[in-house]
Amino acid sequence: MYSAPNRCPICQSELVITRLTCPSCDTALEGRFRLQGPFANLSAEQLEFIEVFVRCEGKFTRMESELGLSYPTIRNRLYEIIRAMGYEPGKETSPPLSEEERRRILEDLDAGKITAEEALKALRGEGEDE
C-alpha cells in the first residue's frame, strides 16, 4: 500500500481524498475528505525526519550521527517542518518571567487567590486569552 500524496504533482494544490475503502469488508465511502492535523501537510521526507527526531529524543547530536548531517542542516530542516505546520520558529515562546513575577504568582497561589492550574499557566507564560 502506498502513502497518499498531499499535493498535486501538476499545480501543487492540496489534494482531496474522494473515496475511502475498508479492506476487510469492502465498504466504501465517497465524498470529499481532507487529511487533518498538523502533520497532514508534511512530505514523506519531513515525516521521516520527525520520526528520527522522536527516536533520538530531540537530541541533535544523536541526529547528526544517525542522519550524517550537520547541526545547522538539522536545525534548518526542523524549521522548515515547523513552518510547514503553520508556525514560525521562535515566535511561540514567551519571554521568561522575572523573579518578582514568579514570586507574586507563588504568593497568590499560597494565599488562595489563584488555583494551582492558574499558577501553572502563569508560570509557563500562558496568557488568559490563549
Image: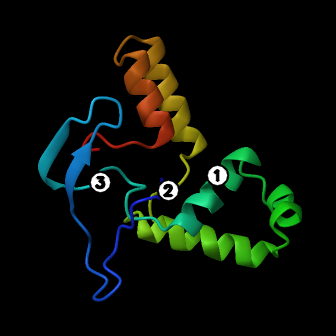
Q: Residue at x 34, y 50 (%)?
A: 37
**Residue 130, numbered circle:** none
Quadrant position of residue 40: bottom left
In the rendered structure, the answer to whether residue 10 lies left or right of residue 46 reads left
* Percent x, y of residue 128: 28, 39
Instruction: Give the mark toward the camera: 2 or 1.
Output: 1
> Dot 3: within a 10 Å radius of its alpha carbon, few (fewer than 14), some, or many (20 or more) residues?
some
Residue 74 higher or lower than 121, as above or below: below
Q: Secondary structure at mark 3?
A: loop
Instruction: Give the mark toward the camera: 2 or 3.
Output: 3
Q: Is residue 97 visible?
A: yes
The residue indicated by pointer 2 is 93
**Residue 51, numbered circle:** 1
Q: What's the residue type where badge 1 is placed? A: Glu
The residue indicated by pointer 3 is 35
Of labels 2 and 3, earlier in sequence is 3
Q: Secondary structure at mark 2?
A: loop
Between the residue at mark 2 and the residue at mark 3, the CA separation in whole angstroms equals 28 Å
Of labels 2 and 1, earlier in sequence is 1
Residue 88 higher or lower than 122, as above or below: below
Q: Residue at x 70, y 54 (%)?
A: 52
